[in-house]
Amino acid sequence: QSVLTQPPSASGTPGQRVTISCSGSSSNIGSDNVNWYQQLPGTAPKLLIYTTDQRPSGVPDRFSGSKSGTSASLAISGLQSEDEADYYCAVWDGSLNGRYVFGTGTKVTVL
Amino acid sequence: QLQLQESGPGLVKPSETLSLTCSVSGGSISTPNYYWGWIRQPPGKGLEWIGSLYYSGSTFYNPSLKSRVTISADTSKNQFSLKVSSVTAADTAVYFCARELTIFGVAPKGPDVWGQGTTVTVSS
């Protein structure tokens, strides 16, 4: 059971804005930076956002990340068909001697 | 360009030890700038971090797996390895190796480069 909770699904039509939430606690999101990963079907995950709000080179600026307290969010603006994928938040959790944890994952569907 | 490639048996019998190797090209694992780790994904499920290794030899493991997991490195071959002992069907998953970000080497801060993954099935 993950300590980071995400909605199982989200959807939108092309061009719309979609937001995915990630709820944690003071031992993880509340005290460290969050990464977001995109996993297309049958492929390895790809780093989408690091250090809460930074985009690696090559990631479109349609993707943005933010954090407030013990929750984080990923926003996809101008949704495109190729954005249909699973999205995971992730962060270091300082409890239990420390471990890296992934969120439960959100399936984004482009209608 | 950094590339990681997992290798190892695709089928392991229950109670035996799962062994995988990650070969790294385009960069050295003997760098203080990154950790090197393993993540797995059971069929149809989410991602689970297994553990990470630093160039100094220090390791972090997921507490839920710590008693069964060992991650080690062979710097001469620029490879690092995963061993999971006493496997059961619950260990059936796609196993990914990855380079992990860090800040001053204190702890791993998540993968930034992933291997393509290798499927391991635990079955007799």
Image (cartoon, rainbow, N blue to C red):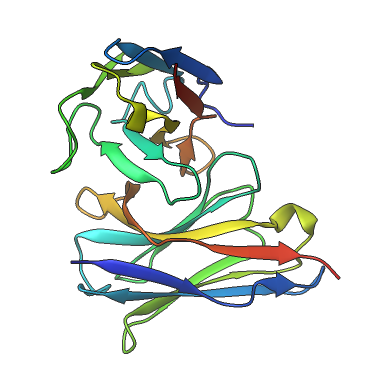
Residue lying farthest to the right in this orientation = B124
Q: Residue at x 25, y 59 (%)?
A: B34
Residue B116 as seen in the image, left or right of residue A105: left
The residue sitting at 30% across, 42% down in the picture is A47
Q: Is residue B65 above or below residue A69?
A: below
Image location (x, y in percent) of residue B121:
71, 64
Please tell me which residue lies in front, B54 or B113.
B113
Identified at 32% across, 16% down, the residue is A14
Residue B60 is at least partly visible in this image: no
Q: Quadrant of residue B124?
A: bottom right
Question: Which quadrant of the figure has residue A73?
Answer: top left
User: Viewed as shown, does residue A45 lie left or right of B67?
Assistant: left
- In this rendering, position of residue B53 left or right of residue A9: left
Q: Position of residue B74 (x, y in %)?
A: 39, 83
Give percent across and percent down for residue A45. 40, 46
Please provide percent x and percent y for residue B4. 35, 68
- In the rendered structure, the answer to whether residue A1 lies left or right of residue B110 reads right
Residue A66 versus residue B45: which sits nearer the camera? B45
- Vertical relation: B68 (above or below) A55: below
User: A103 or B86: nearer the eye?
Assistant: A103
When asked about the image quadrant of residue A1, the answer is top right
